């Protein structure tokens, strides 16, 4: 039974690798695609939050449609060109080929750049939220303060 188990495991390993790490339809590509969109879209939060706060300040009230438009337009303007540059026509497959040729120092450098990109996205979201409340003049009291 143990021999059959390891034989079956060895035969199914390429399918599992393709499922998780496949370059065209793998789970990791789907996750990277989702995370790219999520983090890249948060860079527009500063502009969206400021526009929304200014709209509320001058008009007094806001409806759901206006909120969606204020967040969708800057996100679309910034995200669509970036998406087309990376994911349209499977351009990321060319990037994979280039990445595989590079040395370890190059990969470490790009890991740091990616980390800075993610931290910058989180910081831009928090800064946009802070500007939103500052423009509206809302004071937030945190429990630890």
Image (spheres, rainbow, N blue to C red):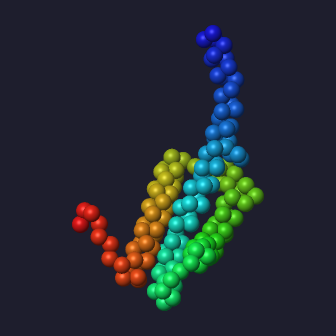
- Give the residue at x 73% y 55%: 90
- Give the residue at x 52% y 66%: 42
In the image, 83: left or right of 112? right
**Which quadrant of the structure image shows residue 15?**
top right
How far across and down, in percent of the image, does residue 10 sit?
66, 22
Residue found at the very far left of the displayed protein: 145
Residue 134 visible in the displayed image: yes
In the image, 131: left or right of 74? left
- Give the residue at x 51% y 88%: 59
Q: Is residue 55 depicted above or below 88 in this figure?
A: below
- Give the residue at x 66% y 63%: 83
Q: Is residue 105 depicted above or below 66 in this figure?
A: above
Q: Observer-nearest residue: 43 or 73?
A: 73
How far across and down, in percent of the image, does residue 36 sit?
58, 58
In the image, 46: left or right of 100? left
Residue found at the very far right of the displayed protein: 89
How far across and down, in percent of the image, does residue 46 sit?
48, 75
Q: Observer-nearest residue: 38 or 62?
A: 62
Quadrant location, the N terminus? top right
């Amino acid at each position: 039974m143990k021999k059959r188990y390891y034989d079956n495991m060895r035969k199914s390993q390429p399918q599992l690798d393709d499922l998780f790490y496949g370059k065209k339809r793998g789970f990791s590509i789907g996750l990277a695609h989702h995370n790219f969109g999520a983090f890249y879209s948060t860079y527009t939060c500063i502009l969206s939050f400021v526009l929304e706060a200014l709209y509320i300040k001058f008009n007094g009230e806001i409806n759901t449609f206006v909120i969606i438009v204020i967040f969708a337009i800057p996100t679309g303007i910034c995200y669509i060109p970036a998406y087309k540059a990376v994911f349209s026509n499977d351009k990321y497959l060319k990037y994979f080929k280039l990445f595989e040729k590079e040395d370890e120092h190059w990969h470490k450098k790009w890991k740091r750049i990616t980390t800075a990109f993610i931290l910058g996205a989180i910081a831009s979201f928090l800064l946009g939220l802070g500007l939103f409340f500052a423009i509206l003049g809302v004071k937030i009291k945190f429990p630890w303060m």
